[in-house]
Image: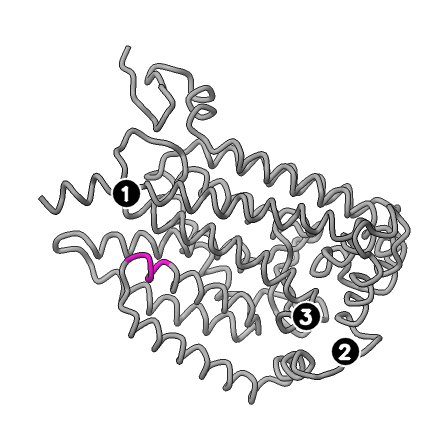
Amino acid sequence: MTEMAHGTVIVHTGDAVIPRWWSTIDRVTIGCIFGLFAIGILLGFAASPPLAERNDHEPFHYVIRQAAFGGLALFVMIVVSMMTPTNVRRLGVLGFFGAVAAVALLPIFGTDYGMGATRWYSLGFASLQPSEFLKPVFVVFTAWMMAASQEVAGPPGKSVSLFVTIVLVAFLAMQPDFGQAALIIFAWGVIYFVAGAPMVILMGLAGVVLAVGVLAYNSSEHFQRRIDGFLSDEVGENTQLGFATDAIREGGLFGTGLGEGSVKWTLPDAHTDFIIAVAAEEYGFVLVAVIIALFLTITLRSYFRLMKERDPFARLAGTGLVSLLALQAFINMGVAVRLLPAKGMTLPFVSYGGSSLIATGIAVGMLLVFTRTRPQGDIADHLLTRSR
């Protein structure tokens, strides 16, 4: 029986799929994901009963739904993580075209649920937000294009991916959903940077993003109101940021105790966008530090493992996926402490939300594929060989 060295692990090629998967997967990252999900369920017990009461549901209606969606997300994550990079690329490219079509058809078949932005499809029993699923498959498609452009006589992948990015950002801005549009731009920029983009081009891209931001500020009252609120010296006591700020202040180091917080009764998005305020109030800075540490562990471990990856596609796609996950977590927590303007964005695996949970499960499953140890030398050895 042939043996292959996967980093420091010896894997038998004839082994069953699950033992081989378990010996090559990043088990620490999986543990961190399950930890975040467990914290999300714990916070759901604290944050969701007021919402259930307002909507005439059972007290833990939303906790049960979060557990169901989260369980499905974890199952999808595990299944996807057992795939090969080639199959992930095929899944990502096919999924990309499906997600683009879903986003493009939102103005015709979508709904805004009275929120002023047409971002969802109503399925009766639940809603579907296609932009959540667009992000991971966009990363895979872009990484595929840019990796292909590095091959001899390869396609103009960088130009094609840039054109696609501009089109997608336009679609998202029409909803309007400037937050998801910003994430798409960020993901493309990170992948382009890792692929070897000149700094001049990246600086030019940053200038274009700034110009688009100014245009959005002058043309969108909703966008302007959020920026003005962020830049204001004072935070309104009866605003979501005001409630979140008070909750974080009240929580202190160890929190007020399970069920003793009050912010969940005043914040309409306490179970989603401002879940970190509930964590800070009831469990204090200690739990917030644990959440931050889990995200940092996932991010840094993924970066270090990807640094050793010599397959350009896997390296680019993995870097884009983990950067997207880290940025979304940073934005969610940054908004709650007023480091960033208010933006409706969930905390991955912690906040309530079916589309967000399942899409994040797909994204992390793909990331786990690209960070699995495979029979290859270090990238430095590969580059040294090429130079000779």
Give the image location of residue 98, x and y in percent: 44, 54
Assess disc 3: are there few (<14), some (14-19) or many (≥20) residues with their C-alpha within 10 Å of its C-alpha: some
State whether residue 190 is above or below residue 77: below
Near-viewer residue (318 or 126): 318
Near-viewer residue (227 or 361): 227
Q: Name the residue type under label 2.
A: Val
Q: Quadrant of the N terminus?
A: top left
Give the image location of residue 102, x and y in percent: 50, 59
Give the image location of residue 165, x and y in percent: 39, 67
Earlier in the chain: of badge 3 and badge 2, it is 2
Earlier in the chain: of badge 3 and badge 1, it is 1
Q: Residue furthest front?
A: 253
For the residues marked 1 and 2, what is the alpha-carbon distance in whole angstroms? 48 Å
Instruction: State the extent of the magenta-drawn residues as a range.
Output: 191-195
Would you name the residue on which mark 1 appears?
311
Earlier in the chain: of badge 1 and badge 2, it is 2
Does residue 107 belong to the magenta stretch? no
What's the image's color scheme?
Answer: one colour
